[in-house]
Amino acid sequence: EKIGLEATTIASSFGKILMNEEKSLKDYNPKDIGLALCRMISYNIAQIAYLNAKRYNLKRIFFGGFFIRGHPFTMQTLSYAINFWSKGEMRALFLRHEGFLGALGAFLMYEEGASSTIIRNLSERRDSRANFVERFTVGRHYSPSGEVKPRGKLERTHSEKSWVEKFMEVGRQSAGMAKGARGDVAASRDPSSATDYLTGVSEYDLWGAETNYLSSGLDVGVLHVDPSLYQFPLLVDPASYEPSVVDISKDEEQRSYWIGVLDKQIPATCEKALASQGESEEAQQKCDAFKWMFGSHLEKLLREPQVYGKFGLCEILEMREECLRECGFKDTYIVNKESENAAALKVLPDLLAELDAMDESARLLSLIEGVLAGNIFDWGSQACVELYKNGTILEIYKQARSNLKSRPWRVDTFDDFRSQMLRQTETNQRYRRAIMFVDNSGADIVLGMIPLVRELLKRGTEVVLAANSLPALNDITASELLPLMKQAGKFCEVIRGGLETARDLYKESRGVLPDVQPLSPTSPAYSPLYIIQNGQGGPCLNLRRVSHDLAVAAKGADLVVLEGMGRSIHSNYNTKFMCDTLKLAMVKNRVLAETIFNGEIYDCVCLFEKAEA
């Protein structure tokens, strides 16, 4: 008041102590001293940062370090100071994983051992840099121990509780504190005041900060480095590549819809998870953990859309699978996949014989129709789940074939694809190598994709089938695909011969996926059929991080086939490649169809795109 400043303005740190000579430090509350000290240091850091940013005409300032990490008070003080001195022109920003920055360069420059025969030159060493992958787990893996007491005992010490129960407790406490902080405290001009520093604090800080007593050792959104994942080499513009078509962190309507869909699917997912492990009491406890874990992530995204940064359908769908794995469910749909594969294999010979009786033009159309009809089998789609309740897999497939929407489909460039194939036949040409990303088990892979694979093999094209590395919904994995293709080989010599050729070439190259083989009089009788992991653990396809074998297989490939809603519509619908591309899917979600191409449920997509330079 003496010098005309408002009560909320700090004229001088520790000014009262210096001006009042009658008191000593002992006369002041230690908490007030600590608060003033933190403010002084924070304002000093902020002012230095502001002056440097002003000198270089920068508008965004990133802060990191132990003084900031996990301390909402420090972050808000810095934000307030930068905003104050810059008059709102600059922003203070904080990285969720800034603790990794010190080792960032070392991880990005990761290289395989010097003795590796894979890395031969500088450009390949650049491609071998590690990838950072965010895992949306919340604690250590579920591991029942002797400490876990039977249900019904009400009072137990913290150490006696399983991590599942601790997680539930933390969730309740955190949600309660966040609600109280937002609902009971009004914002002031200085957001770093002692009484209201929780106002506006992201719930992420309450859950993820190691120094917060609520965290109980739980981590939300942990960054991992994976040196085995690579960028897919056939992307036209890797720098601007974005797999997800819909960014739910920015689109409120889409965010609300998709989170609602996934939330409604939790009971059905738990039912499948429980069945996959025999419906035991332990499995039920894991289901309870999954409900809380995934449900908490969804609630967090609803309240704080930016808490995980840019977040698309790819990420939220993979988050569900990570939560299932974290809770001990390795393959939720294993029972369904096995039964559907067996049922579809029984009718495969008749389907192949029917295709062989057609002329080339009609056969190509029937092959694509078969892929589109088979793609209806998706346990991630509520519309598909309803179909399962009313018929067997073969009944649904036959119905899908007969009810397939007439051409032109919603997205239909099939005639371009057929013309390309017929032209190759006339000129005795072929695709050298096709990389085919497969989707679901059952009729999708057996009655849809296998006939298309066989067609390409018969034309002399090398085929690389890329399937999930880890289970997700009813998607087939690479480890499941190999025995399935061997079963199909019993009915088809082309499939069997392709697997045998691939096996022999692998042996010659000492376990490394070989380059495209040139045509010669000594070429094998059957084109090779390779089966590899794609590096994914979710139902979508993020080509920023694929397996090493897939990155190697891309060398010489001149056709990419993306099959399924997750791999060609949820993700990669707008992605351009340096080779010809065929995107095939049946859309099993009304909102997705309307959003992307103003379509409707069960619309078909057959998009053939020529290579871009």
Image (cartoon, rainbow, N blue to C red):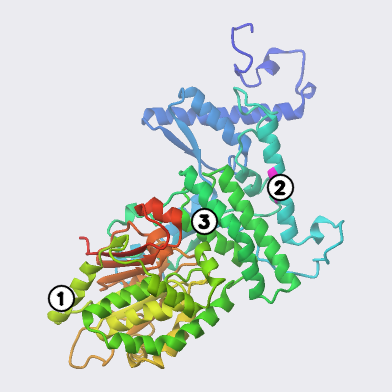
Report the magenta residues as a range: 171-175
Residue 107 makes an appearance in the image: yes
Query: From this viewpoint, is residue 508 visible?
Result: no
The residue that mark 1 highlights is 423
- Type of amino acid at the residue the image marks with label 3: Ile
* Residue type marked 1: Arg
| Image quadrant where residue 60 sits | top left
Discs 1, 3 touching: Cβ within 8 Å: no
> In front: mark 1 or mark 2?
1
The disc labelled 2 sits on which kind of residue? Leu
Badge 1 or badge 3: first in the primary sequence: 3
In this rendering, the answer to whether 232 lies above or below 83 is below
Residue position marked by numbered label 3 in the rendering:
316
**Is 76 contained in the magenta span?**
no
Q: Is residue 30 left or right of residue 88?
A: right
Q: Is residue 480 above or below residue 237?
A: below
Q: Which residue is mark 2?
A: 214
Quadrant position of residue 586: bottom left
Q: Residue 292: horizontal and vertical position, in percent?
A: 67, 56
The residues tagged by marks 1 and 2 sit, at their Cα atoms, a distance apart of 66 Å
- Return the residue nearer the eye: 125 or 500: 500
Majority secondary structure in the magenta region: helix
- The residue mark sitting in front, 1 or 3, is 1
Residue 128 appears at what percent x and percent y? 38, 65
